[in-house]
């Protein structure tokens, strides 16, 4: 009997567990999933929570136990140390687990406190923060709103640009758009890393009268004066600041001998193996691969590692490889969205806002629990 241990029951870990359960026999493979909270939030919904379109917590969260195959043993506990040399994971409540195969899917951790003055900012990177932002937006009657980024890498690269466009739509619907100045502060010279997408984002922002500030890496915030300062020496006075918080890897990665700078994990870009360990993998936001930290990446990677382990257990050569595919739908407001698709070899084509992509985005949101997490798509 082989024992597969998965650390982290978010998007990647859940998909890996479900695909493994489907592709292996219960007599040959035991699957254990460790998650520190046992709750699974659909993070893209936080954006719509902040904008008041999603009203109840129950539509964005599920118990992890409802999402995984009955074959998977769920342990609700925090992994505190991973030792790939000894094939061991230590748990916070005591005890440890030994494995034959390991999948690390611990995601990213937000650390707003790393920006001095962060308490004057809002964000939509966890449920409670999104609720707080919703209340601030609801009572906002006019003035300057700045949307900025506290550090790279961060989850879902289009999210702050998307949020800026959706704010334009939100205030238009409230009939006070003419009283609100929207400023988008971005750490790069263009509003998205990929050139072809950046051009479209630029056009969208101009059309929506969103003021774009390139090369604005937030250094600190003065909460009393309500001014945000950049490393590059710029400053902006705001009435409401939305800051994508800096991100780091999980604490357990920082405490183990597997980390790259920032608490991320170095893996082979195709096989997702940790260097020197062909029985240990990392997927999703936890890795230091130079691609988007996105659910879709965790999704594809979760399937790849599950297929590789299933092949090995069956005594076959694993052939499944991750080709760097990223595909996302980015809401541009007014029921239009753009789609961005690329992989390691092929850069994205110039996207065009369309109602079809908006419907696709809503479809992904709707099928996340039933199809995506099961690894059926
Ligand atoms: C506002 C917002 C909008 C987004 N929009 C999109 C989008 O439109 N499209 C898209 O593709 N992606 C989007 N994303 C990104 C996407 O949600 C993440 O990239 C994705 O969830 C990453 O999956 P993961 O499995 O790597 O990590 P996660 O889903 O974050 O899961 C990590 C899990 O690990 C657990 N964990 C961490 N440490 C430990 C430990 N020590 N022991 C046990 N368990 C641990 C956590 O409890 C968590 O359950 C968005 C994210 C945000 C915040």
Image (cartoon, rainbow, N blue to C red):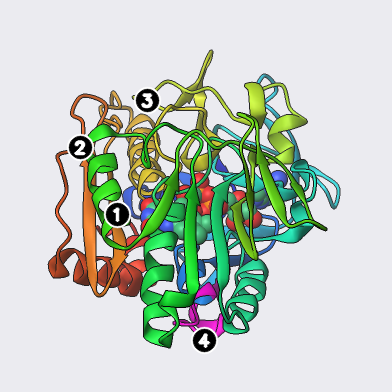
What distance separates the C-alpha of mark 2 from that of mark 4? 34 Å
Q: Reading the chain from its start, which is encountered first: label 1 or label 4? A: 4
Quadrant in which residue 223 is drawn: bottom right
**Residue found at x 70% / y 56%:** 36
Q: Under tag 4, what secondary structure?
A: loop
Q: Are marks 4 and 3 in contact (CB under 8 Å)?
A: no
Q: Which residue is mark 2?
A: 348
Find residue 355 and report its horizontal and vertical position in percent. 15, 70
Q: Reading the chain from its start, which is encountered first: label 3 or label 2? A: 3
Q: Are marks 2 and 1 in contact (CB under 8 Å)?
A: no
Q: Which residue is mark 1?
A: 206
Which residues, given as a range, are shown in magenta? 50-64
Q: Which residue is mark 3?
A: 271
Numbered circle sitting on residue 86: none
Q: Under tag 3, what secondary structure?
A: loop
Disc 3: residue Cβ within 8 A of ligand 1's nearest atom? no
In this orientation, does residue 45 appear?
yes
């Amino acid at each position: 009997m082989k024992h597969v241990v998965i650390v982290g029951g978010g998007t990647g870990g859940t998909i890996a567990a479900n695909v493994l359960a489907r592709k292996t026999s219960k007599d040959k493979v035991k699957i254990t999933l460790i998650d520190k909270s046992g709750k699974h939030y659909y993070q893209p919904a936080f954006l719509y929570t902040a904008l008041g379109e999603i009203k109840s917590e129950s539509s964005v969260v599920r118990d992890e136990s409802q999402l995984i195959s009955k074959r998977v043993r769920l342990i609700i506990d925090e992994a505190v140390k991973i030792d790939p040399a000894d094939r061991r994971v230590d748990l916070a409540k005591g005890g440890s687990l030994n494995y034959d195969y390991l999948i690390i899917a611990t995601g990213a951790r937000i650390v707003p406190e790393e920006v001095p003055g962060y308490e004057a900012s809002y964000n939509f990177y966890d449920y409670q923060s999104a609720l707080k932002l919703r209340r601030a937006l609801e009572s906002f009657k006019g003035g300057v709103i700045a949307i900025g980024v506290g550090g790279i890498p961060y989850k879902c690269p289009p999210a702050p640009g998307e949020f800026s466009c959706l704010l334009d739509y939100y205030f238009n619907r409230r009939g006070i758009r003419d009283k609100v100045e929207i400023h988008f502060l971005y750490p790069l010279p263009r509003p998205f890393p990929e050139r072809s997408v950046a051009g479209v984002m630029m056009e969208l922002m101009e059309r929506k009268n969103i003021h774009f500030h390139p090369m604005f890496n937030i250094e600190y915030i003065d909460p009393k004066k309500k001014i945000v300062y950049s490393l590059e020496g710029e400053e902006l006075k705001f009435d409401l600041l939305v800051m994508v918080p800096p991100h780091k890897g999980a604490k357990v990665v920082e405490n183990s001998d597997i980390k790259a700078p920032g608490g991320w994990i170095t893996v082979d870009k195709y096989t997702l193996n940790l260097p020197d360990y062909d029985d240990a993998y990392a997927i999703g936001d936890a890795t230091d691969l130079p691609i988007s930290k996105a659910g879709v990446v965790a999704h594809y990677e979760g399937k790849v590692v599950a297929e590789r382990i299933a092949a090995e257990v069956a005594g076959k050569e694993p052939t499944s490889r991750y080709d760097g595919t990223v595909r996302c739908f980015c809401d541009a407001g007014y029921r239009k969205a753009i789609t961005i698709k690329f992989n390691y070899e092929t850069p994205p084509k110039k996207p065009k806002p369309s109602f079809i992509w908006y419907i696709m985005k809503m479809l992904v949101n709707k099928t996340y629990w039933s199809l995506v997490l099961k690894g059926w798509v």
